[in-house]
Amino acid sequence: MKLTRREALAGAAAAALAGAGIYELADRLGGDAPKRKSVGRMGAADQHALELGVVEHEGVEVVVPPLHHRLVTARIAAGDPRTAQRELEDALVALEQRFDPTTPAGLGVTVAWGLPYFDRVVPHQAAVHVPIDRRASAERRKRVLLDAVRFPSDPEETILEQNDVAVLLRSDVPAHVNDGAKALFQDLRVFEVTSIRNGF
């Protein structure tokens, strides 16, 4: 049976994807990182904000996010929270020293702690220190962190995860994302990974 050109290209793309991985295929198809004009750090006071730039596309300036990202959700696996905190802090500092954390050419790391972490790992500290939403608390004290809920449009089989943490790794360089993920989730024994979502 003879293959059409479209079938051959689709087969080649599938083989490249299987052999080289999705990041390498995306880099091959997309080319180099865009040449951004700096617009400064978005929200300079925010630790997780990257200095993004703009490119002009069809006469319109467009903010260009980092080309690659990985979102990892996890639960705390370490027995001693204080030791885990120090190890995580050391790993984050080492990544910041190795890769510029302020630009997409380096590695941006954002760590977001979920309500399950506060309720399960540090409940006494959370009861004292998690802020209260004053506007929503006219009758009872409501914390600013809320339980995840299903939307009315969610299917019945939707599972709401109970993760302690979500870590977002962003860079124009896929190797930086891989190195960051390895440093935080393989080299450390702090987390038990529950999901990994890659994007580009």
Image (tube, grey):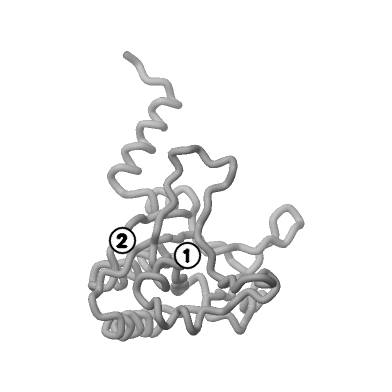
Residue appearing at x 46%, y 60% in the figure: 68
Residue 172 numbered mark, or none: 1
Tell me the residue at 55%/74% (across/down).
Answer: 50
Q: What's the residue type where badge 1 is placed? A: Asp
Q: Position of residue 196 (x, y in %)?
A: 37, 56
Question: Which image quadrant for residue 61?
Answer: bottom right
Q: Say what secondary structure mark 2 lies in.
A: strand
- Callout 1: SS: loop
Give percent across and percent down for residue 79. 23, 76
Residue 198 x %, y %: 41, 54
Q: State if disc 2 and disc 1 touch (CB < 8 Å).
A: no
* Corner quadrant of residue 73: bottom left
Up/down of 95 relative to 119, above or below: below
Q: As rendered, which of 101 and 152 lies closer to the eye?
A: 152
User: Residue at the location (60% across, 62% down)?
Assistant: 64
**Outermost residue to the top:** 1
